[in-house]
Amino acid sequence: MKRYVLQVLMILFYGPVFGQQFNSENDIPNFIRNYLESQSPDERSQIAGEDLFSSVVINQFYSERHFTPAWLKDKKLLEIAYEMRYEIEQSKFDGLNPNDYHLALINSYFERIEAGQKTGEVLNNTDLAAVDVLLTDAFVMLSSHLSKGKVDPESLKTTWNIQRNTPELRIDLRLESALANGSIRKSFEELYPSFTIYKKMRDGLRQLFDDQDRFTKGTLATWKPLKTDKSIKPGESNNVIPEIRERLYFWNFLQPYEPIEEKIYDSIMESGIKILQKRHGLEPDGVIGQGTIRASNMTPEQLIKTASVNLERLRWLPDSIKDMELILVNTANFQLDFIQKRDTVLTSRVIVGKSYHSTPQFNAPMAYIVFSPTWTVPSSITRNEIIPAVKKDNQYLAKKNMKLLTSSGTIVDPNTIDWSKVNPRNFPYIVRQEPGEQNSLGLVKFMFPNKYSVYIHDTPSRSLFAREDRALSHGCIRIQKPFELAKLLLSFDANWTDEKIRNAMNQTKEQTVMLDRKIPVVILYLTSWTDGKGNSYFREDIYDRDPEIFSSLQKIK
């Protein structure tokens, strides 16, 4: 009823605007204003049944220009209008959905306007006003999505606690500037994340779309899911070899050749397998195991989804970290990078949380180092692991250099406890492991206080770094190169020589060393990226976080 009354009042006020078409260019502003004002305040404005998503910004934009068309002149679409439509189409290379930006409706209006120009018919002012408003709404929405992402990470099941950008974009002013300068592309590029990797990843996604085109037009490979019961080594025969070879051809990891035996895994094919393994984060040993089979089963469409999700993740990151000294941990890649002035000064393998103890995504400043740390065992680990182990072996605590403490810190002799009667649920003591080579935290830990109690530390289990799947911890991050990281962090003080650092790592008591500055630590989850040479890499979605984000990206906003 409210909407009906409003429309009646507008018809009375504007008179013939709703009753007939006008041929004058000056009448188009009236139609633009009507589109923007024809809905009640609690409803979104619509054009041809589609919602306008940025009503506040476009009202502000058109009000400032007295509702003059932005994309039209003399009832003709300006060249920049075609550029805008092109950029909407290109948004798929940002992992976005062009349908979010009225693409189909804009195309239909373009066709009708162009058809009218060819026949010399008087164009419909309603259509001209409609397409102008749609293009403006598309610009506003696409600008917003490129700047801070389409998906709100706080709406996801998985916690994302890296603070987002909240700049005042003033997209209405950006649009005026873009129109004046005649460059929509430049305006959008200015909103990209400041990390150089973003444009590389965008190019990588573009290539995947080209691959998808080749895929849908028919490839030599059937791409049926492959399985194998055992690993295949060079020189061995297997029925899946011909199909895998065709897939290597498809990805240009291998140039076509005539094998002596179709089912024999020969040395020529091995070179292509190693490229595939490297792309998917597998040990490039040339052995076709389960991981290599999974990688070979990935289609262009699946990789497009992965790449799209990770472009969105980059848009969530704050620009404030772009030029700073930074410790970056990519849990999906099991890798830590220490970056100074955009140069990577240290790269180290890491071990991260198991799927049911997943390492969270967050950022926090590193403030200090603890050499020769003690480890206060979390109560959950005490209940589920320590107490059962002691019940099996009453010397377990001594062997692990662990002590029992009361809540006030008094040491308790474990031999005075009848462990057969201990109930893990109400165990009153604290378990603390003393410094030493057996300590679960290793010889040093790096602290960046956070609500998750996650930190970076050494580990006595050095052999685990050789594994491909390093999702093995309870959530904290174990680093393969603790000495090297400590040395870089303490380089501000010449007194911290190599010898002094090693001595500090092998003491019988903890030693805390404050850093001279707080270094941002960002723990994120990238399952895809593209390097400076244009090579794209993919990692297994160990925490199953990608599907939810991709689904949200595909929904019409």
Image (cartoon, helix red, strand yellow):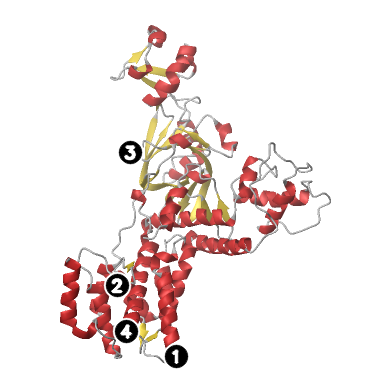
Q: Which residue position is annotated with label 3?
A: 451
In three-dimensional space, the C-alpha distance between marks 1 and 2, rounded to whole angstroms, equals 35 Å
Position of 393 compared to 287: left or right?
Answer: left
132 lies above or below 491: below
- Helix, strand or loop for disc 3: loop
Left or right side of 92 for 23: left
Earlier residue among tags 1 and 4: 1
Dot 1 corresponds to which residue? 119
**Mark 3 / mark 4, whichever is N-terminal:** 4
Three-letter code, disc 3: Lys
Where residue 254 sits: x, y (%)? 71, 56
What residue is disc 2 on? 172
User: Closest to the observer: 30 or 48?
Assistant: 48
Residue at 48 percent across and 39 percent down: it is: 497
Q: Position of residue 366 (x, y in %)?
A: 38, 43
Spatial separation of the CA atoms under disc 2 and disc 3: 39 Å
**Mark 3 touches mark 4? (CB < 8 Å):** no
Dot label at residue 205:
none
Secondary structure beneath dot 1 equals helix
